[in-house]
Image: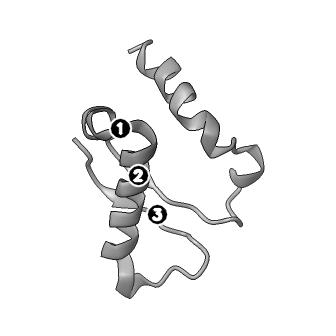
Amino acid sequence: MVGNYFGQLWNGYNENEIEVYDQIGFLFLDEALGEYDTETYIGNIILQGFDSDYFDKSAGIELLSNEFDKIKYTL
């Protein structure tokens, strides 16, 4: 089940809208990975912006589902 949401650093992020960003993050993963995988395997969601140290190492959204499945099947 999806646990804590924290660390939102999206461009334009506003603390007053934390619940909106949390819902967007959850729905985004729900669509990309499927409801079952999102609710079963995702514990925490950390949303980060383009200025994140990890952004340059990130992969395209089209790879998310396959990369997630590779990791999931090793559990």
**Dot 3 lies on which element?**
loop
Residue 65 percent across, percent down from the top left: 51, 32
Residue at x 68%, y 44% (from the top left corner): 60
Q: Quadrant of the C terminus?
A: top left
Say what amino acid the circle numbered 3 marks.
Answer: Gly
**Dot 2 lies on which element?**
strand
Q: CA distance from mark 2 to mark 1?
A: 15 Å
* Position above or below: 2 against 75: below
Q: Nearer the viewer, residue 62 or 42?
A: 62
Contact check, label 2 and label 3, Cβ < 8 Å: no
Quarter where residue 49 is shown: bottom right
**Dot 1 lies on which element?**
loop
* Position above or below: 9 against 17: above
Q: Which residue is mark 3?
A: 7
Query: Number of labelled discs?
Result: 3
Quarter where residue 48 is shown: bottom right
Horizontal arrangement in the rendering, residue 35 relative to residue 15 (left or right): left
Horizontal arrangement in the rendering, residue 71 relative to residue 19 (left or right): right
Q: Which residue is mark 2?
A: 45
Say what amino acid the circle numbered 1 marks.
Answer: Gly
